[in-house]
Image: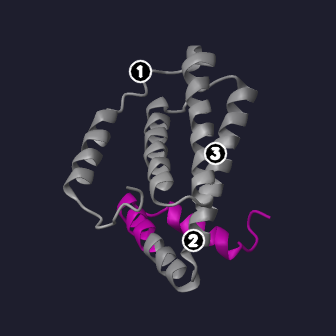
Amino acid sequence: MKGGPKRPIHAVATWVRRQPPKIKAFLAVVSGIAALLFLRMVVHDHDNLFVSAEAVHALGISVLIFKLTKEKTCAGISLKSQELTAIFLAVRLYCSFVMEFDIHTLLDSATLVTTLWVIYMIRFKLKSSYMDDKDNFKSYYVLSGRFKLASSTSTGLANPVK
């Protein structure tokens, strides 16, 4: 079937693979914008979209835990990225407790617990397979930038719990 007719999706994928990196980047940006516009037109209740995204995130972390426990290696997983994710989730969970207590709080709690479990696995159970020299990202750049941005902006939201 090598010389036979190609499926349209295969022909498009082959065409994209042959393009230079700048064209691929442009196509990725245009596709992302088109996807966002499509979501804006289709999704009317954004709360359902956020709940779905949080549920998929928790599921993805659970799959990562399954991989870690089954393969007994954490090669290729960034501990620093997991720590940044845990910090983000902890702050978001705090805000959720203070401002609203709903399904987002429960899903964020589940995601934070699973992320902390991944950090525990990498730090203590799978420490021998963790490649510290490859995980050389400077976390404090992200944290200091986030702190500066957060302290220089105001959301204008009143804190309902005083």
Q: Which mark is residue 133?
A: 1
Q: Identify the residue at the far bottom of this view.
A: 41
Position of residue 105 measured from the top left corner of the image (x, y, whole percent):
57, 54
Separation of marks 3 and 2 at Cα, in angstroms: 18 Å
For the C terminus, which image quadrant?
bottom left
Position of residue 90 measured from the top left corner of the image (x, y, whole percent):
47, 43
- Point 39% across, 63% down: residue: 25
Q: Quadrant of residue 45?
A: bottom right
For the residue labelled by badge 3, is the local secondary structure a helix, a strand or a loop?
helix
> Which amino acid lies under the numbered mark 2 shown in the image of this protein?
Asp
* Residue 103 relative to residue 78: left or right: right
Work out whether residue 81 or residue 6 is closer to the camera in this orientation and state it.
81
58, above or below 6, in the image: above
155, above or below 36, in the image: above
Read off the residue under disc 3: 110
Query: In the rendered structure, which segment of residues is drawn in magenta?
Result: 1-30
Going from N to C along the chain, the mark reached first, 3 or 1, is: 3
For the residue labelled by badge 2, is the local secondary structure a helix, a strand or a loop?
helix
For the residue labelled by badge 1, is the local secondary structure a helix, a strand or a loop?
loop
Q: Which mark is residue 47?
A: 2
Of badges 1 and 2, nearer the viewer stands 2
